[in-house]
Image (cartoon, grey):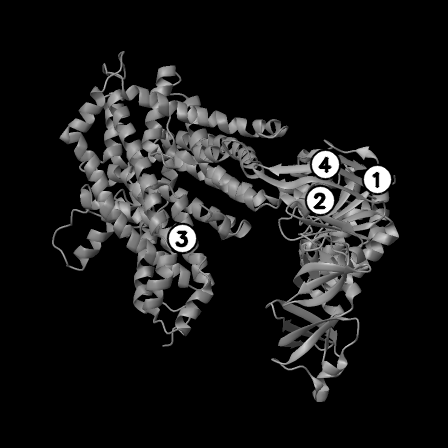
Amino acid sequence: MKRGQFWAVAPLVTPAMAILVLFFGTLSVMITYSFLPSTGMGQIGEGFTLENYQKFLGDAFYLSYVSRSLVLSLYCTAITLVLGYLVAYVMYRASPTARLIIGLILVVQFFTAYVIRTYAIMLILGRNGAVNKLLLNLRLIDEPLQLIFNELGVAIGMVLVSIPFMAFPIYSSLHVIPRNLELAAHSLGATPFNCFRTIILPLSLPGIAAGIIIVYLFQITAYIIPGLLGGGYFDMIANLIYNKAMGAMDYPLSAAASVTMLVISCTIVFAAQKLFARLSPRG
Amino acid sequence: MRPTMRSISPLTKTFGYAVIAFLVLPLVVLVGVSLNAGVEQNFPPSGLSLRWYANIVNRDGFLNAIQMTMILAVISTASSVFVSILAALAIVRYRFFGRDLLLTAILSPLIVPQVVVGMAFLVTLSAIGIFKSMIALLLLHSVITVPFAARVMVGTLTGARVSLEEAARSLGAPPWKAFILITLPLIRPGIAAAAVFAFVTSFENFTATQFLVWDRTTLPVEIYTYVQTESDPTGAAMSSAIVLTVCVVVLVLSRVLGLDMLTKR
Amino acid sequence: MKNTVEIRNLTVRYGQTVALRDVSVTLDASQFITVLGPSGCGKTTLLRVLAGFVDYDGHVLIGGEAHDGTPPHKRGIGIVFQDYALFPHMTVAQNIAFGLRMRGWKAAAQKDAVTDAIQLLRLDGLVERYPDELSGGQQQRVALARAIAINPKLLLLDEPLAALDKKLREDMQVELRQLQQRLDITTMFVTHDQEEALALSDKIIVMNHGEVRQLGTPMEVYDHPSDRFVADFIGTSNLLAAQVVGREGNMLLCHVADGILVRAPGAASDGADVFLSVRPERLRLARQNDRIAHDNDVPAIIEHVTYLGHRLKIRVRLADDSRIEIDQPNSGAFSEGDAWSVGETANLTWEPRNTIVIDE
């Protein structure tokens, strides 16, 4: 560090360092707990042990939570990608007024707590909810559909809640594509579809990559959506961690599960970044 | 039709707007349900009444939760914006060992799952013994709001022209005066945006917060338990009140700050 | 010693890169000195060292006083930045008064000084405007007004005219020079535009890769470039590879392009490989019946003629495939059907004393 610069930088950076110590400190304690034996009721014993990981990773029951979280989120992210791209594209092509309105709608979604958005979806999908009421009135069904408290409800909820997270990064990428590119392509004879396929889509790849990472991470670690829309019948990994910690008070086991989720999340982020860096066109 | 710059096939357009409608629909239903005259959570509402909004006041749980949530949000917003401005100044204006690492570390809570953060705070704070306390929640919220504020502040300061501060210094202003008189006024929109994101993050946080609540809870937690246990529209009313407030705030902010600032996530 | 600037053994490093390498120059008091060079040559770094924004090894003395370690806000130097750096949230008057405000001047005194500056820089009527309501030229003048309002001992200008269009730039060049002379401030002007440098300066410092290549008056730098870089950077150099084969009086005899003998002033050893440079306007294309005795004379083939209205630029090729550019006034021969045509052979002639010998 250059002379004199240390004294300028240090005070600026100290508060942030305090926050980081707090954050990484708590994470370290949690990681430590995952290697300690559990003696029930939130108590822990002495000594390093791998029993929590063995219990968690060795038991098909626990692993099923992990796998169902990873797998369902895969499907949901794919669907979210299509729908989110649609929204971003419509916004990209819209008139300035329409774009403003769509933007405001998306921002409102962002700023509204997940709990509220999920509850609102419950009201639509429930047995007495809007969807069933409509289908019954139109006599398309005789009995209300079970759209809630099952995997389907959770899936629908995850997609709906995630769409804004996908739309925004994709729109950001689309937004910066120079208008001239399309004009050039058209003048060279490209149909609108070709233009989309060869120009717009590749250039929106960074946004797609960002969106996929954000959405997938969000979905595999979701708590509220499986909690409310799953009603206990489709708990995901986050629900398991909470239940084990607050219900059974088995801190070490929950810690081990948390560490596993952390490792999975970090891996996904790094792997996806490497993958997309390789795939995306230069510039 | 010859392709124009704004050309989009009608089919795509229809589907796109349909998806957007599906984003709006739940909130519309929510508000509708909250206006029910009866106890049933019907949509369309059977009879219109504001009684459930009035009922919010009767529920101590909600009132206390509102208070708790606001206190947490205001304090953690202030602290994280403060931390972020300082850290962003260091990161953007100086080259020092570990600078990139620092930035990554500050933003890292963004990729750590909320449930893991909650777990980490739970075990640590209960081991220390400050579990189930205001301090615990304040610590948690201070931490989770920082990355959001920091991201905005780093972006803002990257765009802020250093030459302005240098000009001020060359004219005789010591560095701190140059910052306060020149840079600060010009990054006000950025600070406002950072504060907004921090506030929203703290206000709506559920998954991590629920690990640390006891008799006293925050609003999201209160709503969550309410809608699972009770079946009258009060929960919908409380939620709608928040949604409508958000709408108003977003409209005002988009006027004052411009939509661009709000979408800089 | 009044506001002479002395720079001694100045070295600046950014990490592994050396931006300035052991630079020593003196800027004489009250002179307009231009630092000229391509991007990355270190000229802006030099300016920032004087301003106090960069750490360095070496010594800087302004008016005889050492300034190493003095922070920018205590240096009393006026700076005009490339992007003008006008405070967007302050009016023109507030911008100009800023330095005075920092020095604790009373409001009345500030107002007087601002009024003087406004008149000097012809900014009347713009006092209450904000920077984004001004044209580029007006912004530039406000930046100048702000810098001189504090009565600086040194004025630093970092490519201030770069953003202006050609006509405006030329007007501003004149105005700038007149202002500097009127205020009698030592001024350092940074630019990559060599025409600008030649037009404005008392002295020019030519830099490349962090080093000073030449310090001299415009005439010295143009007519007697010290090395190939300076010859190339200022004007067109028209370099010819040559070999010294002897002397005649105070002239060197050299072989160029397929063994043609030419004369050039200078001193170099027999057999040395040198470069000869002749400025385009000192070359003349002649036909067989048009040659002057004692002139250097090399056969050339015409490759391209560019008509510029008041001048003609003609590019020719010599026997050794080197390209030479000739710049001659449009005397009317072009329009009279007497013009040069591509592919025609002609004689490239010039007076020997106009040859510049560069021996690196």
Q: Which mark is residue A105?
A: 3
Residue A14 lies, with reference to residue C321, above or below; the image says: above
Residue A146 visible: yes
- The type of residue carrying mark 2 is Leu
Percent x, y of residue B224: 31, 35
Residue B1 lies, with reference to residue C110, above or below; the image says: below
Name the residue carrying label 1. Answer: C106
Circles 1 and 2 on the same chain: yes
Give the CA separation, mark 1 to mark 2: 31 Å
Q: Quadrant of residue A235?
A: top left
- The type of residue carrying mark 1 is Lys
Residue at mark 3: chain: A
Name the residue carrying label 4. Answer: C9
User: Image check: B49 left or right of C146?
Assistant: left
Percent x, y of residue C311: 73, 75
- Quarter containing the C terminus of chain B: top left
Give the CA separation, mark 2 to mark 3: 50 Å
- The type of residue carrying mark 3 is Ile
Give the CA separation, mark 3 to mark 1: 53 Å
Assess disc 4: are there few (<14), some (14-19) or many (≥20) residues with their C-alpha within 10 Å of its C-alpha. Answer: some
Residue at mark 4: chain: C
Tag 4 and tag 3, C-beta contact below 8 Å:
no
- The type of residue carrying mark 4 is Asn
Circles 3 and 1 on the same chain: no
Q: Which mark is residue A65?
A: none
